[in-house]
Amino acid sequence: MAIQWFPGHMTKARRQIEDKLKLIDVCIELLDSRLPLSSRNPMIDDILRDKPRLIILNKADLADPEATRKWLAYFRAEGHVAHPVDAATGTGIKEIPEQVKLLLKEKIDRQIAKGMNPRPSRALIVGIPNVGKSTLINRMAGKNIAATGDRPGVTKGQQWIKTGGNLELLDTPGILWPKFEDQDVGYRLAVTGAIKEEILNIEDIAFFAVKYLVKDYGASFQERFGIEKLPEDLENPDEIVAVMEAVGRKRGCLISGGRVDLEKASRLLLHDLRAGKLGRFTLETP
Ligand code: G4P
């Protein structure tokens, strides 16, 4: 299987982020609530080092709320400040400046003790493609999208975007690359659309999704697609094909002879899944 990550991209991305770290007080690491570990760059600790970090579990609206609670506890147990957000509608956004303030409390207190008026804290958003970086920046910017320029320490061409709550964001986020040497990590990323489908076979991605949905969300999946009997052996490809055929029939993916077009059924299934039409789901647990 030809899945891999991109060392060239990663090296360049890493350098770009390291350059930006010099300009900021805090890093906002954006993860996908449906797959917090798979959407995390495994070198992130090494890249961010001791820079204060806020972990945001984005797309919380699409994830299983119980799983999100577990993931928040997991990251908090690791010593991080973690917060769930739905950047698309803005739920959880207004708490971000407060969370940053908590993270930087000592630094801010020191400035106040010296009689200084605390300057706005500066943040960089980092995350893998499609995790919602631009959506979050736009949300947080509100109407302040065209904001300050020309501040000391700002490299040419970079702008700070004002948000509420004495927090400024660097306008260009840091793009991290997911690492998917592990085949299942690749599939999870593909199920959510975080990596291009062409890298993997669309039917394989849908099969992976079906296995997971049947295992963890069997009842609602069965009801939605009118499946008579859920597979008992998830390792038996014939049983998964039977489920995919039921999905295809339900979604009208028939070809001549009444057979099901599995490729089309796979596409529709993944489309519905990503759009949240099959309910909220999380693809991995801590
Ligand atoms: P990026 O900058 O990290 O690459 O991601 P971007 O903001 O472009 O977001 C990628 C997709 O994820 C967008 O959908 C965006 O609307 C969606 N998205 C971001 N945050 C959330 C969230 O919290 N919840 C949900 N449900 N969706 C979110 P798209 O289909 O690519 O674009 P669009 O049709 O929404 O414009």
Image: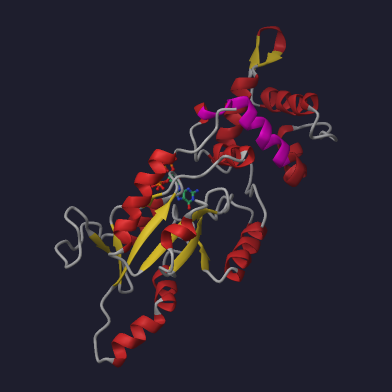
Q: Quadrant of residue 272?
A: top right
- For image coordinates 49% across by 45% down, the residue present is 178
Question: Residue at coordinates 29% horizontally, 57% vertically from top-left?
Answer: 19
Q: Residue furthest left?
A: 150
Residue at image coords 79%, 35%: 234
Q: What is the quadrant of residue 100 in the picture?
A: bottom left
* Magenta stretch holds residue 176: no
Q: Position of residue 167 (x, y in %)?
A: 32, 70
The N terminus lies in which quarter of the figure?
Answer: top right
- On screen, 138 above or below 194? below
- Describe residue 258's horizontal placement relative to residue 172 as left or right: right
Q: Position of residue 228 (x, y in %)?
A: 82, 31
Tell me, yes or no, whether the highlighted magenta stretch contains residue 212. yes
Quadrant containing the C terminus is: bottom right
Question: In the depicted view, which residue is nearer to us: 285 or 88?
Answer: 285
Q: Which residues are magenta?
A: 199-213
- Image position of 195 with respect to 140: above or below: above
Q: Return the residue nearer the eye: 211 or 76.
A: 76
Q: Position of residue 119 (x, y in %)?
A: 25, 77
In the depicted structure, whether residue 198 falls above or below residue 192: above
Please tell me whether residue 254 is drawn above or below residue 218 in the rendered image: above
Q: Residue at x 59, y 68 (%)?
A: 78
Q: Is residue 256 left or right of residue 58?
A: right
